[in-house]
């Protein structure tokens, strides 16, 4: 079975540019989680969706961050405009039910210069 | 109250030794305690999980010990191997709310020397 697929794997861009990270859920999964991982703050939950509906976006750091689920199998996380402090590894994870484990993608390593 | 405190930050063990990582929590509503293993360049992957109705769960060389009264749980890796070298995260969640959010510990970088 294909796992959670994230793209791109690496992104290097200049400050002020728009960045779009993409995530394809495991087929049949109905919950989607976006995390950010840094050395200083560890794994932070940014936002999660249940059945395509955003449930809790309290972890989104600023209005520069936005996330969408245009359909049941795909999500995007957008940063506009990007700043150097946004540099991190961004993970998405999907889950098939409330009592099922989260399955993580391999992340997007984002560097903002 | 949502924090999960993990220690140590890093751990070096000889091949064949026992690796022990500890976590503590405050929120008594937590009822699911997974451990995730992360290799460089990869996402965290579920290793083993426990619910508070049991005090221990074992899967192969990996064991979770759970102490509900102390609000602590730990991961034991028996006969540690160089291939176990990775970062380990404990986590906790509660069944309240519309979805189970995981609260992660800060991670332990394990190095197993050959």
Image (spheres, rainbow, N blue to C red):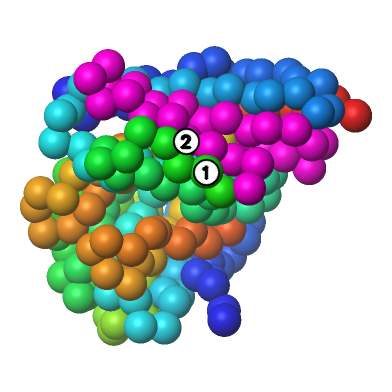
State which chain disc 2 sits on.
Answer: B
Tell me the quadrant of the picture where the C terminus of chain A can be found: top right
Can residue A99 be seen here? yes
Where are the magenta residues, as a range?
B60-87
Residue at (58, 65) in percent of width and height: A8
Query: What distance separates the C-alpha of mark 1 from that of mark 2?
Result: 6 Å
Residue at (38, 66) in percent of width and height: A94
- Marker disc for residue B20: none
Image position of A58 (left or right of A112): left
Q: Tell me whether the residue at label 1 lies in contact with that at label 2, contact meaning CB atoms closer than 8 angstroms.
A: yes
**Where residue B72 sits in the image (x, y, percent)?**
34, 22
Q: In which quarter of the image is residue B94?
A: top left
Residue bearing the label numbered 2: B64
Q: Nearer the viewer, residue B7 or A105?
A: B7
Residue bearing the label numbered 1: B58
Verify whether residue B74 appears in magenta.
Answer: yes
């Amino acid at each position: 079975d294909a796992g959670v697929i994230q793209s791109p794997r690496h992104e290097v861009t200049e400050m002020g540019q728009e960045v779009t990270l993409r995530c394809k859920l495991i087929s049949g999964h109905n919950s989607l989680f976006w995390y950010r991982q840094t050395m200083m703050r560890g794994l932070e939950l940014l936002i999660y969706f249940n059945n395509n509906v955003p449930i809790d976006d309290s972890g989104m750091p600023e209005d520069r961050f936005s996330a969408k689920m245009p359909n049941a199998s795909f999500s995007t996380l957008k940063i506009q405009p990007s700043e150097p402090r946004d540099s991190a590894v961004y993970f998405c994870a999907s889950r098939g039910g409330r009592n099922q484990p989260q399955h993580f993608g391999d992340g997007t390593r984002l560097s903002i210069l | 109250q949502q924090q999960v405190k993990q220690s140590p930050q890093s751990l070096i063990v000889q091949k064949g030794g026992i690796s022990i990582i500890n976590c503590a929590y405050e929120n008594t509503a937590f009822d699911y305690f997974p451990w995730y293993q992360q290799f460089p360049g990869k996402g965290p992957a579920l290793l083993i999980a426990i619910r508070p109705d049991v005090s221990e769960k074992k899967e192969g060389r990996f064991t979770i010990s759970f102490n509900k009264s102390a609000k602590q749980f730990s991961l034991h890796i028996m006969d540690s191997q160089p291939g176990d070298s990775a970062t380990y995260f404990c986590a906790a969640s509660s069944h309240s709310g519309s979805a189970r959010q995981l609260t992660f510990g800060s991670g332990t970088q394990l190095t197993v020397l050959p």
